[in-house]
Image: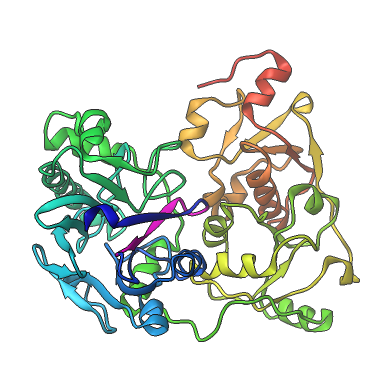
Amino acid sequence: MGGLMTVVPLVDEGLGNSSYLVDLDDGRALVVDASLDLRAVGAAAERRELTVAFAADTHLHADFLSGARRLAAMQGAEVLASEAGRRTFGHRGLRDGDEVDLGGLRLRALGTPGHTHEHLSFVLLDGERPLGVFTGGSLIVGAAARTDLVSPDRTESLARAQYASLQRLLELPDDVAVWPTHGAGSFCSAPPGADRLSTIGRERATNPLLQVDGEDEFVAALLGSLGSFPPYFLRLAELNRRGPLPDRAPALEPLAVDKVRTMLGEGAEWIDVRPTRDFAAGHVPGALSIPFRAAFASWLGWLVPDERPLIVVRGTDQDADEIAWQAAKIGYRFAGEVAIAAWDGQLTRTRLVGAEQVGGAVLDVRQDSEYDAGHVPGAQHIELGALPDRADEVRREPTIVMCGHGERAMSAASVLERAGHRDLAVLIGGADDWAAATGRRLAT
């Protein structure tokens, strides 16, 4: 039977995660770590004429809403998840060593706490032969997922648990496939550019965290690699424990300008998802720029409070359904949209500059690791995610805002404009472009 089984990775490039559809070769499928946005799962299952019979979650996800309960409601899938997660909806609670008969293949739960306290990995077995292991946020390609998402006082103890969990996974044979959930682009600590799939043997030989000399060195290395993460990570695990089940598909409903004015006066947020150059050419004063691209959901959740009504401005060539679904994956629903051409009030413009024009005050809003790798000498540094709370630290003088390409810099400029800053410009490009244009070296 094992040779007929097929595992189909379904990659979310924006959030940096993978879910998996396993064709069980009998018209049924197992899905692991599905997002609330089930369009890719549905398309893959439809192509293979499969019904999803099982929906397994490796842990209470902090970076996206789970689609497991929705699969149960739509297709009658049995939800498989850790008993220790105390989910409040119907599921089969599993403990370490429990097995589920998939109809020829078996799925064995392996307790691998660390990324979260209730984390399970799932070993896919053909008879007694392990074919692969869904490692979730335990062993990932070239790293292990972060352990600081449950609570600050548990970060180190969970890091020690993560070490023990990785050692346990290394007991599997070298040829066993590793199917992790978190991958490149995830704020759950996958290294940039890493492959998304691996094997136990490859990770044993090449994963830096598996080359350390014992538990203490592992903990120091893991904790030393932790960067910042979006604040919505702190609330999604609880939503997943309760089982998100939307009453309808997300959508962008058109709003009249008068209605929008009233909503803005009552505290609504205006989110402009148009490309950087379009926003620069003219935007509603106070609008927050979050250009729609792969990382859109992460920055939406980082910069925008979830309790306020959100109004969208998009370009005519930007897909309304895609924008709505990207937001829904992290628990955001938009109140509606209005076309920029319909707005009859004042518009604000933001100046764009090239690398050869950089001079005077510079604000770099990249992540710490990016800034440390090389930056314009003398540039002030505040991560974009921290900027809404630290806007008063930015110099009140002509300032050029920069990131790696321009999108985050425009978001930062819009944050600063809302805080009263003027005479801002955004660099189209990044630090390497500045070095190439000036012939000068970056500071480190």
Instruction: Classify 424 as above or below 84.
Output: above
Q: Which residues are magenta?
A: 14-24
Residue depicted at x 53% and y 51%: 385
Q: Residue 339: x and y, percent?
A: 82, 69
| Residue nearer the viewer, 101 or 289 | 101
Q: Residue 127: x and y, percent?
A: 11, 57
Does the rendering let one see residue 19?
yes
Which quadrant holds residue 20?
bottom left
Residue depicted at x 29% and y 57%: 5
| Residue nearer the viewer, 298 or 180 | 180
Q: Residue 303: x and y, percent?
A: 56, 59
Residue depicted at x 81% and y 52%: 278
Q: Main secondary structure of the magenta part?
A: strand
Does the rendering let one see residue 37?
no
Which quadrant holds residue 121?
bottom left
Look at the image and tell me in which quarter the N terminus lies. Answer: bottom left
The reply to whether the magenta stretch includes residue 48 is no
Which quadrant holds residue 144?
top left
Instruction: Classify 258 as above or below 175.
Output: below
Residue 148 vs residue 307: left or right? left
Instruction: Classify 234 as above or below 259.
Output: above
Instruction: Classify 384 as above or below 361.
Output: below
Residue 283 vs residue 249: left or right? right
